[in-house]
Image: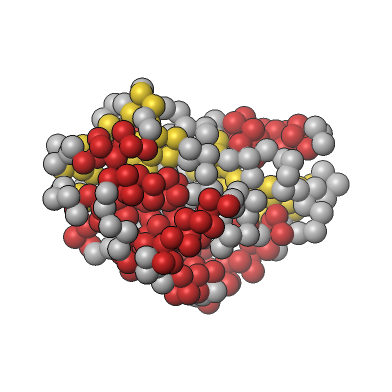
């Protein structure tokens, strides 16, 4: 695996004739923003570019792309992964298929496993910040379509610029994108101020599941398949729900355990300084950032994995 600079990555992309851009499973605004922005930029140079996602993309992101922009996981295209720290995050059905085939990974997770031939890695608030620099280095125009995609990733990965990962560079990037035409009012309204009745019902059910542990410094919330069925929601409707437990006064780390249809639980951790979420998740083979990280738990071993997760949380809290 070779570590590339922004300019080297830009040149490598421009040398390709056909690319397939991978997003992670349960896609969020950052991975999608990266993928579609890079797709639009590559096409400006005559490169055939499409995006692959193993899961259905939530309707709220529909302004970024058209159905024909999506591709199946086949063909001879040069493969680029964006906002993906581990090849397993492309989906259980596809990780083996993509293993050893990713030519370039562009990511902001320090826990990146180095699964690609080439890697561009930077610890920034959103991978879209890094994609912005690469697109600029390519010499592509930042038009409205690209600006909308990149602003979405930056806004959603920073909680509309509220999270501690937000930096001066984050605001500078957002300002550049607004100047280029990003519809920030529409994007922020759709991402942060609009919910279906089903989503509100799901949140209400999830709130009732919250447990306070370790003298109120940890909150654990569980979202089951039954809750989603009752509220008529799907996994794609769970965006933002992981931040709820951390909002409780006195809580330093919030854990959301979300049951999925494949026999696993997605664990999402959010914390306040100095609790390190990535360190906690490493106990279950996960990773991410200091204030936001994730891992998986097995349904068949739920109690065993939950115990391991709580032990890891307690170990981190005991450091304070």
Relative to residue 117, is residue 10 depicted above or below? below
Q: Quadrant of residue 12?
A: top left
In the figure, is residue 164 to the left or right of 100?
Answer: right
Give coordinates of residue 29: x percent, y percent: 44, 57
Image point 36% across, 30% down: which residue? 4
Relative to residue 266, is residue 160 depicted above or below? below
In the rendered picture of this protein, how many numbered marks are placed on residues?
0
Q: Residue furthest right?
A: 215
Image point 54% across, 74% down: which residue? 193
Q: Quadrant of residue 57?
A: bottom left
Give coordinates of residue 188: x percent, y percent: 50, 70
Give coordinates of residue 148: x percent, y percent: 38, 64
Image quarter of the N terminus = top left
Image quarter of the C terminus = top right
Give coordinates of residue 194: x percent, y percent: 51, 75
In the figure, is residue 85 to the left or right of 78?
Answer: right
Image point 29% across, 40% down: which residue? 10
Image point 32% across, 66% down: which residue? 144
Q: Is residue 90 visible?
A: no
Q: Is residue 283 visible?
A: yes
Relative to residue 290, is residue 252 depicted above or below? below
Q: In terms of depth relative to the viewer, which is nearer, 142 or 24?
A: 142
Relative to residue 84, is residue 54 depicted above or below? below
Q: How is the image coloured?
A: secondary structure
In the figure, is residue 45 to the left or right of 1?
Answer: left
């Amino acid at each position: 695996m070779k570590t590339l600079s922004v300019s080297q990555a830009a040149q490598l992309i421009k040398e390709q004739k056909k690319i397939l851009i991978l997003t992670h499973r349960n896609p969020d605004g950052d991975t999608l923003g990266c993928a579609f922005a890079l797709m639009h930029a590559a096409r400006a140079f005559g490169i055939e570019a499409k995006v692959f996602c193993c899961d259905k993309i939530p309707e709220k992101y529909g302004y970024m792309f058209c159905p024909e922009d999506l591709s199946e996981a086949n063909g001879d295209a040069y493969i680029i992964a964006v906002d993906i720290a581990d090849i397993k995050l492309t989906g259980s059905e596809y990780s083996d298929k993509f293993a050893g085939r990713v030519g370039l990974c562009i990511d902001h997770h320090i826990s990146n496993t180095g699964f690609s031939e080439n890697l561009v890695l930077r610890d920034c608030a959103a991978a879209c910040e890094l994609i912005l620099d690469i697109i600029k280095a390519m010499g592509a125009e930042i038009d409205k379509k690209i600006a909308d995609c990149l602003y979405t990733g930056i806004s959603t990965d920073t909680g509309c610029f509220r999270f501690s990962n937000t930096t001066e560079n984050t605001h500078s990037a957002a300002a550049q994108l607004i100047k280029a035409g990003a519809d920030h009012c529409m994007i922020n309204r759709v991402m942060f101020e609009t919910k279906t009745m089903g989503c509100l019902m799901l949140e209400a059910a999830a709130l009732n599941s919250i447990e306070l542990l370790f003298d109120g410094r940890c909150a654990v919330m569980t979202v089951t398949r039954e809750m989603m069925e009752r509220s008529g929601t799907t996994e794609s409707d769970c965006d933002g729900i992981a931040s709820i437990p951390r909002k409780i006064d006195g809580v330093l780390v919030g854990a959301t355990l979300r049951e999925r249809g494949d026999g696993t639980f997605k664990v999402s951790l959010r914390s306040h300084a100095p609790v390190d979420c990535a360190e906690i998740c490493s106990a279950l083979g996960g990773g991410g950032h200091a204030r936001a990280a994730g891992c998986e738990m097995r349904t068949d071993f739920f109690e065993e994995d939950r115990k391991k997760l709580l032990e890891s949380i307690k170990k981190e809290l005991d450091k304070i």
